[in-house]
Structure formats: C-alpha cells, structure tokens
Image: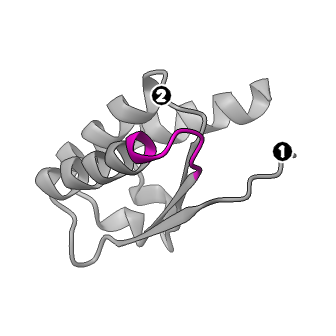
Amino acid sequence: MTSFICDQIIDFEATHAYEAQDIERLIEQVQTSLAEMEGRKVVVLLRNAHYLTTRAFVILYNYIREPFSTNAVFVLVSGDKSRIFPPLLNLIEHRQQAA
C-alpha cells in the first residue's frame, strides 16, 4: 500500500449535495486546489456516496477514469454498496487488482 499524506481534505456529504452540478462543483474545487500549489495532495472524502444520482455518478466516473493528477485521492464511503454506480465499482476493483 502506498502512503499518502495530504495537504487538504475536502469533506463532501452526498446526502445534501447529490446532483450532477454538485459533483461538477466538487471536481472544480479539486482542480482549483491542485492548480493553486504544485505538488499539493488532496483527499476527497465523499460520504454517503450511494445518495448520488446516476448523472452525478457518471460525471464522477468520467473524471476518475481519465488520467488526472496522482495528487488527488477519492474515498467513497457508503452504507449500501449495491447503490454505487456499477461501472465505477468495476473501475475501482480493476485498478486495485492492477496495483
């Protein structure tokens, strides 16, 4: 396992912000944080991820799927794994196996 000491934690609660535009703002916040200081490490704690709409999951999936900075880590927390976007779960599982 690789260690990761972060400079910033973004705490995102999906029970209150679960629409596509909320995830777009979150991604913009991550990109801004990474651009402000080169080498900055950001952790996004996405709590209650199972509340995200399908469109929000698609936006998140597309962002995570594309090559982006290795200085950002997304941690999805959910009490109901069955409600997480299946392609996102497959991507995560595939990346874990490759590591």
Side (left or right) of 78 relative to 22? right
Magenta residue check for 43: no
The residue identified by callout 2 is 68
Label 1 packing within 10 angstroms: few (<14), some (14-19), many (20+): few
Side (left or right) of 41 relative to 22? right
Label 2 packing within 10 angstroms: few (<14), some (14-19), many (20+): few
- Residue 49 figure quarter: bottom left
The residue identified by callout 1 is 2
Side (left or right) of 37 relative to 70? left
Q: Position of residue 35 (x, y in %)?
A: 39, 40
Side (left or right) of 54 relative to 77? left
For the C terminus, the image quarter is top right
Badge number at residue 22: none
The residue drawn where x is 27% and y is 60% is 52
Report the magenta stretch's main SS: loop
The residue drawn where x is 20% and y is 53% is 25
Give the residue type at disc 2: Phe
| SS under mark 2 | loop
Q: Position of residue 94 (x, y in %)?
A: 66, 28
Magenta range is: 34-41
Q: Nearer the viewer, residue 80 or 22?
A: 22
Residue furthest to the front in view is: 37
Give the residue type at disc 1: Thr
Q: Nearer the viewer, residue 82 or 50?
A: 50
The answer for how far apart the CA atoms under marks 1 and 2 are is 18 Å
Q: Is residue 49 above or below residue 53?
A: below
Q: Position of residue 60 (x, y in %)?
A: 34, 42
Count every numbered label the image shows and give the total: 2
| SS under mark 1 | loop
